[in-house]
Image: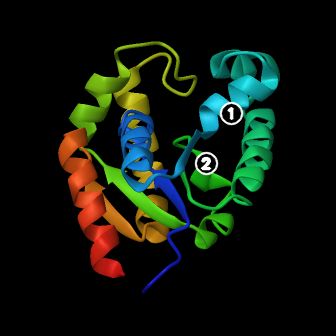
Amino acid sequence: MNKDKERICLIGMPGSGKSTVGKLLSEKLKYSFFDTDEEIEKKEKTKIKNIFSEMGEDYFRSVETSIFDELMNKDKIVISTGGGLILKNFNKLRQSFNIYLYCNLDILIKRTSRNNLRPLLNKNKSLQMKNLFNERKEIYNNIADITVNATNPKNTIKEILKEINNDN
């Protein structure tokens, strides 16, 4: 399938490296980079964890969807999506080239334990991460155009560029 690569979305679990890889990939491709979580924080003028605690997840998802809709009108972009964006934007994602950054659960738990900024991972991180992982992995697999092991960001970029260039 030779899907248009003007809009590339990085999808995957919290901690899979979407923001890190997205910045590097956009530099390599000379594309604009957007992180949906950063865009939400700019628009709402507060941190995501505050949006979750004060307004709830439904409100957060609606803001996320409207920002994602705006971004999808642009060309030559790399979008680092929030881990849960796939839940409400599955059809919209059919319009982009989607790269699933896969990491094993242990690495995800280790990476997300470094801070407390993830609202869906606030109490028992490893159990919550395992539940999210099991809940979302099929959706990620179903919407992904390619899946790349994202354990090492530098290798991840090489792998993505190889895949993107092979497909042309």
* Residue 49 badge: none
The residue to which callout 1 is attached is 39
Residue at horizontal 41%, vertical 19%? 124
- Answer above or below: position of 165 versus 156: below
Instruction: Determine whether 130 is above or below 54 in the image.
Output: below
The kind of residue tagged 1 is Glu
Residue sitting at 28 percent across and 69 percent down? Answer: 163
Residue in the picture at 67% in, 17% down: 47
Q: Quadrant of residue 57?
A: top right
Residue 92 visible in rendering: yes
Q: Is residue 162 left or right of residue 128?
A: left
At mark 2, the secondary structure is helix
Residue corresponding to mark 2: 85
Residue 40, picture quadrant: top right
Residue 28 shown left or right of residue 10 in the figure: left
Q: Secondary structure at mark 1?
A: helix
Distance of mark 1 from mark 2, alpha carbons?
Answer: 13 Å
Which mark's residue is nearer the viewer, 1 or 2? 1
| Residue lying at the far front of the rendered structure | 30
User: In terms of sequence position, does the residue under pointer 1 or pointer 2 come before the other?
Assistant: 1
Residue 6 percent across, percent down from the top left: 55, 67
If the image is split into quadrants, where does the N terminus sit?
bottom left
Residue 151 in sight in this render:
no
Give coordinates of residue 16: x percent, y percent: 35, 39
Residue for point 50% across, 70% down: 5
Looking at the rendered structure, the kind of residue marked 2 is Leu
Of residues 6 and 21, the one nearer the viewer is: 6
Structural crowding at the residue carrying mark 2, measured as other residues with C-alpha within 10 Å and reported as few (<14), some (14–19) or many (≥20): some
Nearest the camera: 27 or 84? 27
Residue 79 location (% of width, % of height): 55, 49
